[in-house]
Structure formats: structure tokens, C-alpha cells
Amino acid sequence: MRRVIFWTHFVFGLAAGAFILIMSVTGVLLAYESQIVQAARNVAVKAEPGADPLSVDQLVEAAYAAGAEPGNKLTLSGSGKEPVKLLKSRTDLILLDPYSGAVLEDTGHGVKKFLARMESIHRWLAFTGKRNKLVSPLNSFANLVFGGLLLTGIVLWWPKMWRWPVVRAQLFFRRGLTNAKARHYNWHHVLAAWTLLPLAAIVFSGIVFSYGWANNLVYAAFGEAPPQRGGPPAPAAIAEALVELPTGPLEVVSYDAMLTQAVEGMRGWHHVTVILPEAGARSVSMTVDRGNGVQAGKQRALRIARDGSGPVATTMTATGSPASKARRFIRFLHTGEIFGLLGQTIAAIASAGAVVLVYTGLSLGIRRLIRMRKTARA
């Protein structure tokens, strides 16, 4: 049985190695995508020494002057060193200077465009930026093969004797190895052991994105039907009402006062997103985030009464059905972002380890083929 597993691992590793290598290299480049794009955008913000950011009310006025409409999202930074983001639609983003309210050039556009191309290559092997219906399934299948290689690799790595000298040789890099074959063999086994869990999370979450049947299994596990592609999102969970909105003439307090109420008790918050209300609305929806924007447990969504009486409704967790929450978790488990900067770093290291695994695996495989050819000739 071990011999069958070895040859399966060997053949499929050689066949899918190039695809896995490309996915791994682009995975390393995409590991800190959000931080890289944000850093490039922050360059546009240039404040005079001692200058204070505009108030929230002034920034809301600047957003309307830039073409904002009710329902648009305005995201403010707690540090005041980032551009204010006005999101008019999924693709229509306007950046505002937090000190002047002026519309800023998106200095991160070039970086974002490059990383978008890397993502296209990573997901679909689309070097031209357009998804190819012939090549894309091969890339998805290579990721599926990678999952199989991880499983068969466990069997092949497993020591025949659980004695410390034997286990140590497969857990730690060895010095003094005199030839490339021995070094590559050692590197392959050591990196396979230390990167197994993060690579398994990356690979198997990627399968959910690539195959409809895998995505359907996630929803089926919670007894739900998957949403139709391009259809309306799953209905959100209704937050618990705390107070009733008063009736009568509308008295509006400042956005700064409402923001103070929204962030109360949320120490170290990073961003607040305000959904611009209709003129006669009696409450404003805000989301306070003390994470990286994707960690639901570090977000608080509220509706704040515009008369200054405080929160109308609030929730500390992500809204949506259990299956949609699980699907969102899988989405950001793939990038490591669900665990913050540490998770992204682990994902980056694991992807870099996969590059070395492919290199050493191909090296060992090609050497074996050469030896087999020489033996056959002899």
C-alpha cells in the first residue's frame, strides 16, 4: 500500500508541480495585499505639522460635495492618517483628505492593479487578466491535487519507527549534508511537517472557491441552500432592539456626538463606517471595527438615534445565517486574515514553504526519473 501511495504522490506531484508553484509564488505576493494597498494610499495624505483632522460633520459635508448620496458608505480612520473612503458602489471608490476634505488621487491604484493581476493568475492562471475557460479548470484541479499530495504526504512522512533520532531527522534541518539529493530530501520532509496545517487550511478552503459541489457542502452542513450566484444576499439577522425611536419633530445632533456614542466601550478602534442616511431618517447605521476589517468578532454594528438619545440597536457579531458566516470564515481563512496579521504571516510563510516543497519535490522526482532511465538502459 505504501508503494502505491508513493507512486501516486510521485506522479501527481510531477504533473501538477508547475501549477502549484505558480499558485504558491503568487500567494506569497498577495499575503499582505490589504496593507500594501493601504500604505500606498496613505502617501497621498500630507498634513501640516500640528494640524488636526476635520470633524465628522465636515467630512460628511465634503463627501456630499464629492457626489455622495444616501446609502453610500463613509469610512473614517481612528488615526486620522489614512484617506477617508467614500464607497458609492462596489467599484466606485472616492478618497478624501481627512485634513481638507479634498478629493485625493488614488496613489494605490497602480499597486492594486498589479496585485489584481497576481490574483487573476493565482485563481485562474489568467496571465492576460481574463479568465480562460480551458486553463482555469486545470489550475483548480492542480489545487485539488495539492490537497491529495498533502494527504498522501502524511503517510509517506510517517516514521516507520517512532524513535527520537528518526523523528528529529524529519522535523529539523540537518547540517553537513554533502549532496543536493540529501539536502532536498531533508528540506522536503522538514517543511512538509511544519507547513502541513496552514497549507491544508489554504488548499482545502481554496477548493471551496473553485468547485460548486464543495461550496454546496458548506451550506449543506448547516442544512441551508446555497444562494444563487448573482442573486440577492442571504437575509441578515435582526439586531436586538434596545430602545424605540421617539416620534415627533426630528432633532438632529452632530455626527461627532453620534460617533462618540458608537465607539463607547470599543477601545483601540481602527475604523468607523457610516452609512449616509436619508434626510428624514431618525437613525444612522455605523460599524465600529477594531480589527482588520474582516474579523467579525472585532466589529460592532449599531444604529444610532439622530436625536442624541443613543444606540437603537446593536450587535457584536456578523449578521447572516450560520452557513454564510462559515462561508465568510473560510474565505478569510484562505488568506489568514481571519486571524489578523499573525494569520497572514503564517499563510505567507506556508506559501513560501510550498515553493520550496515544489522545488525539492521536482528535484527529487527528476533525479529518480534519470536513475530509472539509466537503470533501464543498463
Image: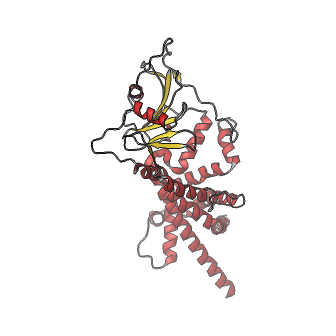
Please state which of residues 314 and 67 is positioned toward the viewer in this rendering: 67
Residue 151 image-quadrant placement: bottom right
Find the residue positioned furthest to the left: 50
Q: Please, is residue 45 above or below residue 363 in the view?
A: above
Q: Please, is residue 308 above or below residue 177 in the view?
A: above
Q: Is residue 364 left or right of residue 341?
A: right
- The residue under the point 68% across, 58% down is 136
Identify the image quadrant of the N terminus.
Answer: bottom right
**Picture coordinates of residue 150, whole percent (x, y):** 59, 59
Identify the image quadrant of the C terminus.
Answer: bottom right
- The residue under the point 39% across, 36% down is 269
Is residue 337 visible to us here?
A: yes
Please state which of residues 73 and 131 is positioned toward the viewer in this rendering: 73
Report the colour scheme: secondary structure
**Picture coordinates of residue 310, whole percent (x, y):** 43, 21
Find the residue positioned furthest to the right: 134
Please state which of residues 350 and 66 is positioned toward the viewer in this rendering: 66
Q: Is residue 171 left or right of residue 158?
A: left
- The number of numbered discs placed on residues in the rendered structure image is 0
Q: Please, is residue 366 above or below residue 348 in the view?
A: below
Find the residue positioned furthest to the front: 65
Find the residue positioned furthest to the bottom: 378
Is residue 158 visible to us here?
A: no
Q: Please, is residue 12 above or below residue 133 in the view?
A: below
Please state which of residues 192 and 138 is positioned toward the viewer in this rendering: 138
**Picture coordinates of residue 211, whole percent (x, y):** 68, 50
**Picture coordinates of residue 182, whole percent (x, y):** 50, 75
